[in-house]
Amino acid sequence: MKTVNLAEKLAMFSSHWDPHVVADYNGNDVMVVKFQGEFPFHNHPDTDDFFLVLEGEMVMDIDGQPPQTVRAGELFVVPKGVIHRPRAEQECKVLLMEPKGEPNTGDPATAAPKPRI
């Protein structure tokens, strides 16, 4: 058991859309990531998608619905199977939780690796 300083972990990398695992929780990866620009539309057929904005703000585009702004201190959960796309005009820092091995794009062929820091 140890404390994880999220600001220190986020300072360890500068890339965008590149999740880094910082802890494990009940079979899930707890990750930090920086968003800027647009991520591709995708879905996760078998799991919900959890986003907690730590700093900045992101917009979640949901297929067939108006975009939703998510600000620092707010979380957003996309239900499994729903087509979505996070985006951020300015850099945004986010905590993610998802089952170990879940590809961030919903497709293992296009998913980013998830290094542990």
Image: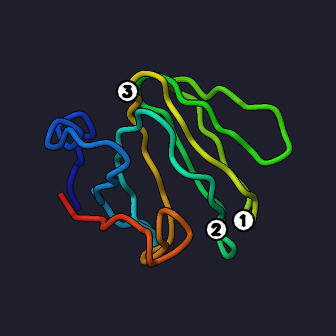
Instruction: Please rate how many residues cluster around mark 3, counting C-alpha atoms within 10 Å: few if below 14, some from 14 to 19, many from 20.
Output: some
Q: Is residue 112 above or below residue 101?
A: above
Q: Mark 1 sits on what residue?
A: 80
Element under disc 2:
loop
- Which amino acid does the dot numbered 3 rest on? Glu
The reply to whether callout 3 and callout 1 are in contact (CB within 8 Å) is: no
Q: Position of residue 40 (x, y in %)?
A: 55, 51
The C terminus lies in which quarter of the figure?
A: bottom left
Q: Disc number at residue 106?
A: none
- Residue at horizontal 50%, vertical 72%? 99
- Which amino acid does the dot numbered 2 rest on? His
Query: Which residue occupies the extreme right position in the image?
Result: 64
Q: Earlier in the sequence, mark 1 or mark 2?
A: 2
Determine the image quadrant of residue 5.
top left
Q: Is residue 35 above or below residue 48?
A: above
Q: CA distance from mark 1 to mark 2?
A: 5 Å
- Which amino acid does the dot numbered 1 rest on? Lys
Q: Position of residue 53 (x, y in %)?
A: 49, 33
